[in-house]
Image: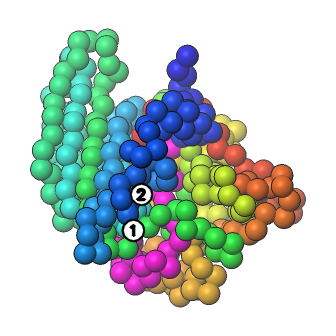
Amino acid sequence: MIKLEHGAGGLEMIDFIAKYIASKVPPHMRNTPGGYGLDFMDDGAVIDIGGGVYLVLTIDSYTVKPPRFPGGDIGKLAASGTINDLLMMGGRPLALVDAVVVEEGTSETLVEEVIESFVSTVAQVGAHIVGGDFKVMPKGSIDGIVVTSSGIGIARTPLVDRRIRAGDVVVVSGPIADHGAVIAAAQLGLLDKVSGLISDVKPLHDLMLPLIDRFGELIHAAKDPTRGGLASVLYEWVRGTQLTIVIDRDSIPIREATRKFLELLGVDPLNSASEGVAVLALPRDIYPEALEFIKSLGYSDAAVVGEVIDSPTDFLRGRVIAKTEIGGYTLVEPSPLLTPRIC
């Protein structure tokens, strides 16, 4: 039986996709020649179209509740999420299409605001909106509004997370967990009682395009920590490898309002979604230059939060461990936020 956890970005979702979706596609259909597809389980797919040029494809559905929240709405979220997935694969966003499905009785004003927000976000990155679809479902057969967005981009240096290796350092571009915290507060009816919470949702073109131009293949992995948060990203990077990621919790940037609110809920910030943060794996010898460059682009809170090592024991293969605030070590595993429909 399908549960909410199967779509929440944690271990359950990863295992479900592998077992019931990816496994149904014959091996010869999972990747195009010279490209990267289902076998890589990344933010999108990469197709080699010749001449050193690659087409990057991505698609996602967005079902956030409420559809408006401090810092954005479902339109901005869908556009940013699609754009960021292209960027994390090394793609320069070229064009998007969207499909909007709403429940009968939905406010026309809300739909108009969502579309305007989607369009203005895409315009920020200089991409195009080349098509879409709109449908209405009978009242009660869908909860509010769902936006599906697909994008294509062009890459000359595809970024594939499987290039991660021992000796890499893990860098985050800014404070984590903001989006998950604000959606949790909204769903619990606490926004008027908690100050300082705001979603970080935004497109990351101003960060990723300069990084790709300057460092190219030296970026061994890149991902935005949406559903499942930072914990899910790191777990996906090393799952099934001979590697271990070690992070230092004290080094991870988190806004104080976000930290306090999540502590109140008993939610680990590592499992809370971000929608405007990049997580990068960079070679140790170039990370000081890269970190300085990231900060020069306006991401002043960027920080090194961990490192990739060869697993010291069989038990730690493909695992993520965290140095705690008191100096001990604990395992880190994806555990979805206990408030569904965050993105």
Q: Which amino acid does label 1 sit on?
A: Pro
Q: What residue type is labelled 2?
A: Tyr
Q: Residue furthest left?
A: 130
- Looking at the image, is mark 1 or mark 2 earlier in the sequence? 2
Q: In this view, does 121 lie to the left or right of 178?
A: left
As drawn, 178 above or below 204: above
Q: What number of labels is visible? A: 2
Q: Is residue 190 visible?
A: no
Q: Quadrant of the N terminus?
A: top right
Residue 8 on image: x %, y %: 53, 35
Nearer to us: label 1 or label 2: 2
The residue at the point 56 percent across, 49 percent down is 229
The residue at the point 40 percent across, 52 percent down is 31
What colour scheme was applied to this rendering of the protein? rainbow
Q: Mark 1 points at which residue?
A: 158
Magenta residues (range): 207-227
Q: Quadrant of the C terminus?
A: top left
Q: How far apart are marks 1 and 2 (CA)?
A: 9 Å
Residue 36 is marked as 2
As drawn, 172 above or below 38: below
